[in-house]
Image (cartoon, grey):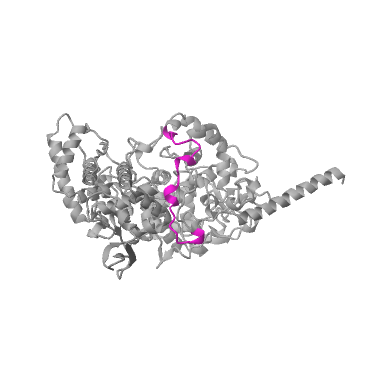
Amino acid sequence: MNRELKSILTLVILAVSGLSSMNVAAADTKARSNQFWWPDQLNLTPLRAHRADSSPYGEDFDYSAAFSQVDLTELKADVERTLKQSQDWWPADWGHYGGLMIRMAWHSAGTYRIHDGRGGADGGQLRFNPLNSWPDNANLDKARRLMWPVKQKYGNRVSWADLMILAGNVSLESMGFQTLGFAGGRIDDWEADLVYWGSETQLLANDKRYHKGKLEKPLGAVQMGLIYVNPEGPNANHDPLSAAADIRESFGRMAMNDAEIVALIAGGHTLGKAHGAHKSNCVGAEPAAAYLEEQDLGWKNKCGKGNAEDTVTSGLEGAWTATPTTWSHLYLDNLFRFDWVQQKSPAGATQWIPADNALQDSVPDAHVEGQWNTPIMFTTDLALKFDPGFREAAEQFWKNPEAFNAAFARAWFKLTHRDLGPRSRYLGSEVPDEIFIWQDPVPAVNHKLVGKRDIQRLKQQILNSGLTLTELITTAWASASTYRATDMRGGANGARLRLQPQATWAVNEPAILSRVLGEIIKIQTQYNNSASRGKQISLADLIVLGGTAAVEQAVQSAGYDIDMLFTPGRSDANQAMTDVASFAALEPHADAFRNYYSPEAYATPIDMLIEKADFLTLSVPEMTALLGGMRTLGISTGGSTHGQLTQEVGTLSNDFFVNLLDMNTQWSKSNAIGIYEGKDRASGSVKWTATPVDLIFGSNSELRAIAQAYAAEGGEALMIEDFVQAWSKVMMLDRFDIN
């Protein structure tokens, strides 16, 4: 070896050694969060997530306008060409990537769960960890990499979130299925969501999410790192009936009934294949743990070619039908015509093949020319045959292929659009004309809206009705605060507060609510009967207007003059437009702003406060101002006075913060569970009572800093201004018609 080359190699070795040392040092110098040192520390991160400055496109980027520039026909043609252009670095099964793309679309949307509205395709969260690296999403990183040339061509005119769903649709259509349509409008996130996926600390574990045999709320999957269920049955027990129970529970938590579940599984497994050509020890780390040089690709396979016929994904191996790139009804035909026996895949996973060598060598191999294989089923597939409820639906689809096609089309559209929000967000030329009840429809406004004079007159009528400010504010809040930014459901529009199930929710105090709504409806009827020039006002608008008028009065009582903006244009839904079972998932089992906490809440009162604020897209100051203001206004379910740290209930003031921070008060636990007493330090007499939700604004250092800003000289005006802005924001959250 010459001297020059030796010197170069020495430098390289030193550089690599230095890099290794630097990595070790870096590991020792990482900043640690407060949660590292104090695991119980309140985490306010959810209220600071997804800020506009996270996006490279800036705060003023209008995705709707950008998407409108796209020729959807051209885009779909580009996607279809990509599906049929097999790449050497990841060869397509049978020369068509359709099965892979359908799985990507499904897994992008399939994380949606009804209890908190989290998950789903909107935002394109499949691009980020942990979802990007979940075991259930193995090799979907390749699907997005294959779609990158299309995304690159269209830039910000097509979001990743939309493209992943569209790729699934185009795949189905390319393979001979007629989809129901496609709607764009999903806006990309630029950071990972902070989502509670379960308390397990190991992927594929499920030892903590079950309590007394019931899956913990708000979770939707039965194991950490799965979209739904283990295809081999619960904990790989290979029992179709227990698998059916898991399927029904998990799919039910994404708002699917038995018929929809059967249609989705049967339709999804009609096309494509599973991959388990080798043992799992062939496969390397997931993207989050892979080496830098892998560039966000994971699951590197060291066995054979590492792809094509050597691919390892789930560990199960094979196709369900003899036509895996063509839509057919062979899946159901195979399921019912044959008995199925267990078989081990090359990876060692348990799957099922037809008994007595039926259908042997009937499936062309995806990569090896001239090789033929036997079709397979998962344990979860056999659940459709052995569970009575699933079997009934499956047999109907088997006997009536057209019904099956229609059911799959509708279930697929629901799966991929469930979290997109109201139809006003739907973009593109392929939006179906049909309105689905799961879209929470509201009628179009077909009347002239009230003007400024009408609004002032209606305000006065409401204030003169005999209803208290507290009742008006509570009712408006009850209507608007059902909104969840996670899936854009709920809100004041539609006035579903008067309908089932909302009218009977415990948090809404049904008897009081009925009386209040009765008075508001009287005012609405009187106005609409006497109005001229086609003007009308909806109950939804009048409920919000009543709350607005009451807040204005409360501000005036504090000595400030304010005229809050009110924007009419809401309409009233009816009971037939409302899916009672679906809406039941929105019931608040905790609402800190109304001082309400039920035993059915799935987290602590403080954690539920943060979640509620997150649903309402509140910042930390907005949450703080709203809660402190609501306490001084006397907003409290059940008449509780805990946390009302003021002598002037009904006046919007900063008293909550002033008295919470008063060092003349000493706080201690009372004999009542979850209640604290604030005693005068000198006399020992009880001055106040409060809940953990109240005291956290003095206990947590970040919240205390904001509380101090509101309690200081000049802070009352600041707090009132922040309260009014936050209130107005909540009242308008579901106004997608103008937002």
Q: Which residue is situated farthest in the front direction here?
A: 682
Of 210 and 328, nearer the camera is 210
- Tell whether 567 sits left or right of 522: right
Dividing the picture into quarters, in which one does residue 250 lie?
Answer: bottom left
Q: Residue 104's x, y, as percent? A: 51, 46
Q: Residue 102's x, y, as percent? A: 50, 44
Identity of the residue drawn at 68% across and 48% down: 305
Of 222 and 364, nearer the camera is 222
Identity of the residue drawn at 49% across and 39% down: 55
Task: Residue 302: tell me if it is visible.
Answer: no
Is 456 included in the stretch rendered in magenta? no
Q: Residue 270's x, y, as percent? A: 49, 48
Is 49 included in the stretch rendered in magenta? yes
Of 360 and 239, nearer the camera is 239
Of 470 and 730, nearer the camera is 470
Which quadrant holds the C terminus? top left
- Compared to residue 433, the image places residue 394 above or below, namely below
Q: How many marks?
A: 0
Numbered range of the magenta stretch: 35-64
Q: Which residue is situated farthest in the right direction here?
A: 2
- Tell whether 127 sits left or right of 65: right
Q: Main SS of the magenta segment?
A: loop
